[in-house]
Amino acid sequence: EAQVTQNPRYLITVTGKKLTVTCSQNMNHEYMSWYRQDPGLGLRQIYYSMNVEVTDKGDVPEGYKVSRKEKRNFPLILESPSPNQTSLYFCASSLLGTGEAFFGQGTRLTVV
Amino acid sequence: AQSVAQPEDQVNVAEGNPLTVKCTYSVSGNPYLFWYVQYPNRGLQFLLKYITGDNLVKGSYGFEAEFNKSQTSFHLKKPSALVSDSALYFCAVRDGLSLNDMRFGAGTRLTVKP
């Protein structure tokens, strides 16, 4: 089954404790992206990747890191989480060009 | 860079009435346009897309969208709304010239009342 898998689905952590949210897709998509969704602000892009070892900043990259060492994986790293990073996070992948995006189920992160 | 605007935060319609959720876009090249739906506690699901060809695109769950190049719009429509259509809807665009990243609108919450 074609899918994008995010883990964990829910996470509560403390300020400053490094964390990684994993994202994996099984569709051989070139493009992968991370978004955060906050009430009233819609879907804001954090980082995206056009292919292995190619990443670029989205609209709200501050406080986040990503890597794309393999085509299928695109982890989101919060080196020192802060409460303003409490949000619902989505990973997505697609073929470049005309392909629609496939989304993971989301990760609800709470930083206390 | 490409961008998308959804001018309405909220759309309310009565069940059985037609619905329209608006979207306008800005790109340098040809637009590749998409609509997604998000139900509570779920990820976004693809509804339909316009790449080229017929301006009226049909998608999942009876939805359709009309591409209007002169007005740079891609409004989502359905002839007869269902209560189960109540959800958050997102429009997205990719620039066909640069083939770079996909940008989303802020979303429109559709509420269909019985």
Image (tube, helix red, strand yellow):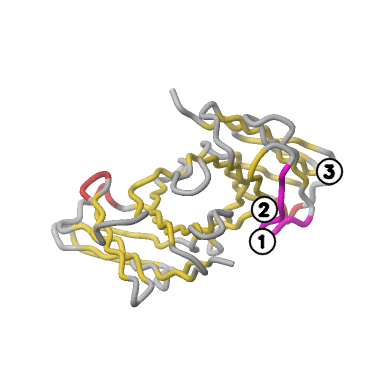
B111 displayed left or right of B33: left
Mark 1, residue position:
A59
Relative image position of residue B109 (x, y in whole percent): 39, 60
Q: Give the farthest residue toward the bottom.
A: B70
Q: Would you place residue B71 above or below residue A56 in this image?
A: below
Q: Chain of mark 2?
A: A
A48 displayed left or right of B97: right
Residue at 17 percent across and 57 percent down: it is B15
User: What is the three-letter code of the residue carrying label 2?
Assistant: Ile
Is residue A11 magenta-colored? no
Disc 1 from disc 3: Cα separation: 18 Å
- Residues tagged 1 and 2 counted as in contact (Cβ below 8 A): yes
Relative image position of residue B29 (x, y in whole percent): 49, 66
Mark 3, residue position:
A79
Image depth: mark 1 or mark 3 in front: 1
- Residues tagged 2 and 3 counted as in contact (Cβ below 8 A): no
Which stretch is magenta?
A54-62
Helix, strand or loop for disc 3: loop
Helix, strand or loop for disc 1: loop
Q: Chain of mark 3?
A: A
